[in-house]
Amino acid sequence: MAALKPLVPLGKGNVAVILPDTVSSARYTEFDAPYLTKALQTAGLSSSQFTVQNAQGSDATELSMAQTAITKGASVLIMDPLDSGVGAQIEKYAAAHGAQVVDYDRLVLGGSRKYYVSFNNVRVGTLLGQGLASCVTSWHVSKPNVLVMYGDPTDNNATLFGDGYNAVMNPFFSSGKWSKVGKAAGTWDPPTALTEFQQQFTAHPNINAVLTPNDENAAPIITYLQRKGVKAKTFPVTGQDATLVGLQNILAGYQCGTVYKPIYLEAQAAAALAMYMRAGKTPPAALVNGTTKDTKAGVDVPSVLLKPTWVTPTNMNSTVVADKFVPASQLCSGKFASECTAAGISG
């Protein structure tokens, strides 16, 4: 990032980062905000040349934050939209006032952003599906009756995740090896996800595996199953985001694995794009490594697509612990000390 410092005097205006909420994932407060702050500082911007804010789950707040930032001189927005509706409003306003936008983590369908930065979200879904399949086998679930759950249907990432895991699971369903049981509408709100699961589990008590799209949604479902007397390594559950609770559920045998996305790389990529855009320069091809289809606008969006990793006890030490994403001291506290020892986790 320090190599980008020569771009600072070439640029005009400020960089405004607007994150969506603190509910769909703890990542925005714990990781994205500090990583983006560090990346922009390391790239040479002073504290008066950028801001990092969170819309706290409000479309109106996110739009207001963007408008205020542009009024105060932001020439580049790094925005993670709550949904494509408010995202498109923000991008229309930005274009009308001479500001450029980077879609961060979520693509705005029907938007007018310049670039998109995220992980390969179809690949995220593929890893979720493959992880469930591996778990079904290793946990010896002889007749899988699977509830397939989703993120919020207004979030394009949730759609891409679903594309990935359904492509893995559909052959199991069509062959009769697995049975698809129940149906959930989709949400990123953990209490709502729990309610969806409880309703389906009550209506279909034969459910014995669930594809959950992230750790936050999986956690209350796992607690519910534990209270129902479900034993470890008998009821496969998946996750994403490598949260502390998610990783501990994996160690305890209640979650198959989690999709780890090194958020510091995403933050660095977004900050680098912002620095080039602010200076009026074209980012190098080594940075912008792909395209993503905006299915509503019918355009291919230049993208930075990063690689996710499926994490289980086998590689937890070499991934999330090695990256200091979750401190071993927290991960291995109390009753999880023995599980960490068995998994070779140190540090």
Image (spheres, helix red, strand yellow):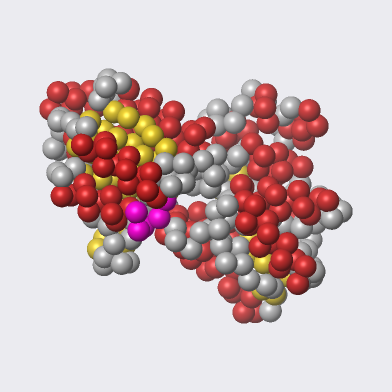
Residue at x 27% of width, y 37% of height? 68
Residue at x 34% of width, y 54% of height? 86
Q: Quadrant of the C terminus?
A: top right
Q: Is residue 319 above or below residue 206?
A: above
Q: Is residue 218 above or below residue 267?
A: below
Camera-nearest residue between 205 and 344:
205
Q: Is residue 58 left or right of residue 205?
A: left
Q: Is residue 80 magenta?
A: no
Q: Quadrant of the N terminus?
A: top left
Residue 213: x and y in percent read 58, 55
- Please tell me in which quadrant of the rendered image residue 272 appears: top left
Residue at x 68% of width, y 59% of height? 195
Residue 269 visible in the snapshot: no
Question: Main SS type for the magenta part?
Answer: helix
Q: Is residue 127 left or right of residue 206?
A: left
- Please tell me in which quadrant of the rendered image residue 89 appears: bottom left
Residue 214: x and y in percent read 58, 51
Residue 74: x and y in percent read 22, 35
Camera-nearest residue between 237 and 308:
237
Q: Which residues are magenta?
A: 82-86
- Please tell me in which quadrant of the rendered image residue 49 appears: top left
Residue 63 visible in the snapshot: yes
Q: Is residue 84 magenta?
A: yes
Residue at x 69% of width, y 73% of height? 181
Q: Is residue 23 above or below residue 3?
A: below
Q: Is residue 334 left or right of residue 16?
A: right
